[in-house]
Structure formats: C-alpha cells, structure tokens
Amino acid sequence: MPSVLKRRKPKFPLILVKDVKKYISSCAILNDVTWLSSHLDSQYIIWSSHPTILSISKTELNTNPTTISCCTLKESLSYARSLVNENKNILIIAGAGCSTDCKDEHGNNLPDYRSSGVPVREELDDPALFLSNPSLIWGIYTDKMKLFLNGIPHQGYEIMFKYLKNSDKNFYVMTSNIDCQFSKSGYKHIYECHGALNRLQCCDLKCKQPIWNINSINDFKYYTCETCKKIARPNVSMHMDTNLTYNNTISTKQKRNLLKWIKNRNNLLIIEIGCGQSIHSLRLESDYLLEKYPSTTKLVRINNSKDEQNFITDKIVSIQCTAEQAMCDIFSDTVNLKL
C-alpha cells in the first residue's frame, strides 16, 4: 500500500477491513478506490464507491431482522436514558449534526461548516494558499471563524455536561467539529480530530513556535507567527493538508489520551451525535469500537436524517431526531420536550 493515499473516484461497494495486510495482494485492482483510515486506528480502513456509509442499523436490518425491535421516538429516548444511567463510562462521538441547533450571534441556526458562508471547496481548502494567495484564503477563514467562534452552544451541550459531571461519570468527547462548542460548554477531555478554529499555527513547520490560542478575529490583517513573523493559519486539518503542512501536535496528544482512557474502561457506552452517513463520518469510529470490544460496548446513535429509524437491539439504540432534543431528553428529567 502506498504511504500517501490519494482520493480517487471509487467503483465498488464499501468494505470495512481490520487487517489491511490481508488485502495487499489485491491493491492492483484497487487503483480507483477512495481510501480512508480510522482516526482511532490506522489499520482500520474503509474503501468505498458508495456515497454513504452503510450504517449498522441498515446492516442489521438486512441481515438479522430478529434482533431488531422497532419502536417510537419516545421509547428509543427512554431506553437510551436507562443506558446512560446504568453505564459509568461514556464516550461522546460528535459530528456536524451536533452543532446545527446552535445559534449565531444574530440568533440564527448555525449552518453545517462546509455549507457556511463561502463554501470551502476542495481546491480552496489548500494550505498552500496561505502563502500564494493569503487574501483569498484568510478572507474565507475569517468569515468562518467569526461565525463559529461567536456561535452560542445550544442547551443540549450544557445539560449533558452538567449531568455527566454531577453524576460522577467517566466521560470523554471525540469530535470532528472545529467550532469549539464543547470547550465553550465546559468539556475538558476532548479529542478534536480535525483541530479547532480557536488555535493557530505557523505555516512553516520548521519554525519552533508552538500552536497558540486566539480570543478574537482580525478583520483586516493576516495573523503572523509570533516567533518567525511568517504568515499563520488555523490549526485545522484542511482537505489538502499533509504531515508536512498540518501541525498535529495537539490532536496527536489528544488522541493518545483518549486511547489510554478507552483502554482503561471495562465497559463503554458510546453516544454518537449527528455523525451523518458520509464516508468522512465519525460513525466509522463507533463501528470500529463496537467491533473491537463487542462484549463490553453499546451504542446510542442519534441522527436527524430521514434515512434513520427508531429501533433497539441488544447493542444499539437508534434515535431519529435533532441533537438538541435528544441531548436534553436523555440527560435531563427537567426539560419537557414535545415528542
């Protein structure tokens, strides 16, 4: 397998593989395949020609329907609440759908990151532009940073945090979101696998300047490195980033801490929130953990997609509703939501 995996137009159905070495001999016929590796385990690989991940819900419905108990939204939320009460170790895995109920400074719902303002198309999400065309790329990122860093977390973040903290749960967060809504809401143990918009890095990785935090957004000038004075950039993983352009010091440390935390848990309840069905989705990580620790892991999957269903199995609870509604209902008895 090549050391650098490139995006290609894939041609055949999705397969999840734990032992990639087994498939090395097939690489010659996989030239047109999109490869993605897990954020938790680089040996857990997905290749796909399908635009969406085949969720466990659809897989189980197709292969073992006797394990499925279809139910109402109220019943799935109630069962998820009982699992939270019973389990001490809780991992929150959050995607873009977890934040779309948040508000901007004008009271409007925050958009999905990639559809906000000027969309960051693949060719524009390139760190090389900070050197070749800084006015263009900083113009895009300034608008996005102002929108998301000034955003207001919805009540689900606070209610979930207060419940987990006050009930002495062991909890951790893994998120692909770079909008900082979890840290704003008080969460400390976080793995931000794509970085965060409130952190900057020098564009020159040979520079010794550590990643630094920012508290405000400049409107009319570029950020520069405090050490070498060269141009700076957001410390987020861009589409065209490589290990030669993205400073992954913080995210690597966060990942190491999360993996250590998971290893020390005897049982684990995953609360997956708003991870969608894209091949980029963190629901891949939920599937990975369910497969790696099948006897000690359970999953609550919350997604507002019309393709999701409300059902319960011995390992999975699927909930079709918004992130805010589910988080408030599951983690609080005082919030009366209309179901």
Image (cartoon, rainbow, N blue to C red):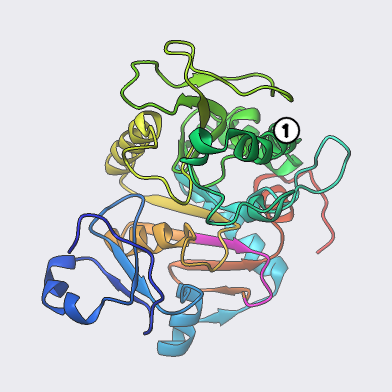
| Callout 1 secondary element | helix
Residue furthest top in the image: 227
Which of the two residues, 131 or 37, is positioned nearer the viewer here? 131
- Residue 36, given in percent of the width and then of the height, sits at 35, 62
Which residues, given as a range, are shown in magenta? Answer: 300-307
Q: Is residue 112 above or below residue 25?
A: above
- Residue 147, given in percent of the width and then of the height, sits at 74, 38
Q: Residue at x 48, y 73 (%)?
A: 55
Residue under pointer 1: 146
- Residue 234, given in percent of the width and then of the height, sits at 53, 32
* Mark 1 surroundings within 10 Å by alpha-carbon count, few (fewer than 14), some (14 through 19), many (20 or more): some
Say which quarter of the image contains residue 155: top right
Which of the two residues, 129 or 238, is positioned nearer the viewer here? 129
Q: The N terminus lies in which quarter of the figure?
A: bottom left
Image label count: 1
Q: Examine the rendering and report whether any part of residue 235 can be seen.
A: no
Q: Is residue 184 above or below residue 285?
A: above
Q: Examine the rendering and report whether any part of residue 162 can be seen.
A: yes
Q: Is residue 16 magenta?
A: no
Residue furthest front in the image: 132
Q: Residue at x 63, y 74 (%)?
A: 310
Q: Is residue 187 above or below residue 292?
A: above
Q: Residue at x 65, y 46 (%)?
A: 331
Q: Residue at x 62, y 24 (%)?
A: 222
Say which quarter of the image contains residue 261: top left
Q: The C terminus lies in which quarter of the figure?
A: bottom right
Mark 1 residue type: Lys
